[in-house]
């Protein structure tokens, strides 16, 4: 596995890394609303998440959910089917903003919580 996986560590280059990927896979047992799910959609990257992750993170049509109980071959098929699909990929930032996942909307929501 070491030959095929890069443990990149901490970085400030998240947009560059996301733009180099064909898809993003998040096979998590326990997850709230993962910020990475919002980030990948904003960048136009497709994602496959385990069905244990909250569906509220699906803002665009780029996210699919599958069970961790499914055969690993189905997860692998998703990855292989998304290989090379970056052509025509575009930012989904406007969709994310309309869903109120931008900083201004979040600040307004927090202000209302704290002021009430």
Image (spheres, rainbow, N blue to C red):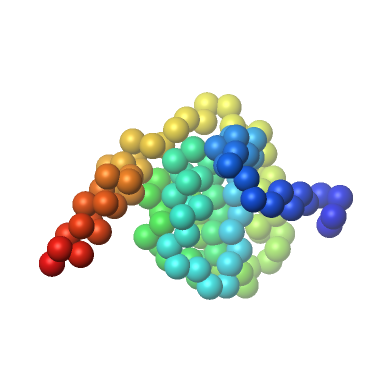
Residue 95 relative to residue 17: left or right: left
Residue 35 or residue 25, whichever sits in front: 35
Q: Is residue 55 visible?
A: yes
The residue sitting at 58% across, 67% down in the picture is 28
Residue 23 or residue 7, whichever sits in front: 7
Residue 1 screen position, x and y as percent: 84, 57
Q: Can residue 18 be seen in this view?
A: no
Looking at the image, residue 71 lies above or below residue 57: below
Residue 6 screen position, x and y as percent: 76, 49
Looking at the image, residue 4 lies above or below residue 17: below
The count of marks equals 0
Quarter of the image for the C terminus: give it.
Answer: bottom left
- Looking at this view, name the residue that lies furthest to the top: 88
- Quadrant of residue 13 in the image? top right
Residue 33 relative to residue 79: left or right: left
The residue sitting at 37% across, 60% down in the picture is 56
């Amino acid at each position: 596995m070491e030959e095929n996986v890069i443990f990149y560590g901490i970085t400030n280059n998240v947009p560059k890394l996301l733009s180099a990927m064909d898809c993003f896979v998040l096979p998590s047992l326990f997850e709230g609303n993962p910020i990475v799910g919002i980030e990948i959609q904003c960048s136009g990257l497709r994602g496959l998440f385990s069905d244990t992750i909250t569906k509220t993170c699906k803002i665009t049509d780029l996210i699919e959910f599958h069970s961790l109980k499914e055969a690993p071959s189905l997860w692998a098929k998703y990855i292989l089917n998304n290989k090379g699909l970056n052509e025509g990929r575009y930012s989904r930032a406007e969709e994310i903003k309309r869903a109120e996942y931008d900083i201004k909307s979040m600040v307004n929501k927090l202000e209302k919580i704290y002021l009430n």
